[in-house]
Image: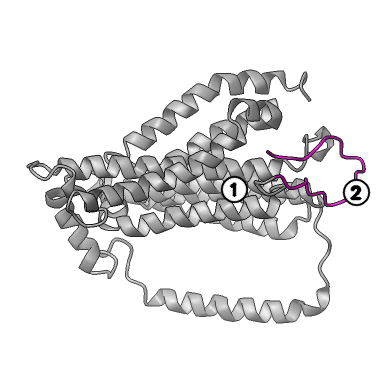
Amino acid sequence: MTPTGEIAALFGRVIDLSLLTMLVLVAYQMLRSRHLFAIVMMSGIYSLLSAALFVSLDAVDVAFTEAAVGAGVSTVLMLGAMLLTVRRESPARSGRAAIGVAVVTLVGSALIYATIDMPAFGDAAAPANSYIGAAYMERTAAEIAVPNVVTAVLASYRGFDTLGETMVIFTAGLGVMLLLGAGAPRGGRAVKDRPADDRGGEDQPS
Amino acid sequence: MRDEHLILRVVIKLMFAPILLFALYVQFHGDYGAGGGFQAGVIFAVAFILHALVMGLEETRRVLPIGALRMMMVVGFLFYAGTGAATMLLGGNLLGYDAIAPHSTHHEGQHYGILLVEFGVGMAVASTMLMIFYHFAGREPEIRDEDW
């Protein structure tokens, strides 16, 4: 490896390690905090940090989605949901802590044990890089003629999957409309959680 | 809240159009660079969510009424499914885009098909995200300052 390449690799490793450290710190703070607003904000930061990590892993499309959905929309939705409930988490009962610690330790050590068998990052012989992944890379230029292979796989090779995904999103929206939406399309009445108290105004979305 | 947050309101006003433009870029540039319908739809929705956070939901509802969102949700999904049906009517498989331009030497049909399908995805995602946001935010009329 050339000296410049070595420096670049070292630099990349430093960035990866600092991002991972920050992820752990943010996750720990989220566990410690009882202030729901702070937790929602930190989950946004967590998403943004993982987006940066995806960029460093060359998964730009995933990073894009994570930044837009995780750090953007879901943070706002969590804020909106938080406004409907209390602002602080109620303290958990400490009696069951031992079971939780045992389960987390067990699952954690199993996962760490599993990483020993994982192929090295960027390994050309790894299952993700051979078989169908390699086939898509080889055939996209000739069959789809689209530079971005991710788009070719998503919209053309697996267009039927994406149709299903769009259907899932549509259904999710429909579910929220039915659960939270005040009133049926044919003139239902506004739903109120509590009898009219301090909140002013009508909460009828349509 | 209306008369406060002047800086935020000015910044959002400045940012609103560039965010929409960026969403359109991500939408229609998806087969050349990163992104596509899903990301573009979310970015499109984020512009309106920012608008709602600062100007108030009532104001945003006047810009983009909930009935229009309801239509967009359905039209977006049907746009995708309709592309699939169209390729079938043209004699290909479901979502077999080559049927759109069968005599093209450089898979023109694939380009058209991907663009159409991604457009449907973007429309469905943007409207669904906004719909969910409207419903969550619509239950609390205004975010009071002490809530922050």
Q: Which residues are magenta?
A: A187-206
Q: What residue is rendered at 39% in x and 43% in y?
A: B120
Q: Amino acid at mark 1?
A: Ser
The quarter in which the N terminus of chain B is drawn is: top right
**Is B56 situated above or below A79?**
above
Q: CA distance from mark 1 to mark 2?
A: 29 Å
Q: What residue is rendered at 34% in x and 47% in y?
A: B82
Q: Nearer the viewer, residue B69 or A57?
A: B69
- Helix, strand or loop at label 2? It is loop
- Residue A126, given in percent of the width and then of the height, sits at 27, 69
Residue A146 seen in this snapshot: no
Magenta stretch contains residue A196: yes
**Residue at far front of view:** A186
Judge left or right: residue A92 versus residue A187.
right
Q: Which residue has dot 1 on it?
A: A74
Q: Which residue has dot 2 on it?
A: A195
Q: What residue is rendered at 14% in x and 51% in y?
A: A143
Q: What residue is rendered at 45% in x and 51% in y?
A: A53
Q: Nearer the viewer, residue B54 or A92?
A: B54
- Helix, strand or loop at label 1? It is helix
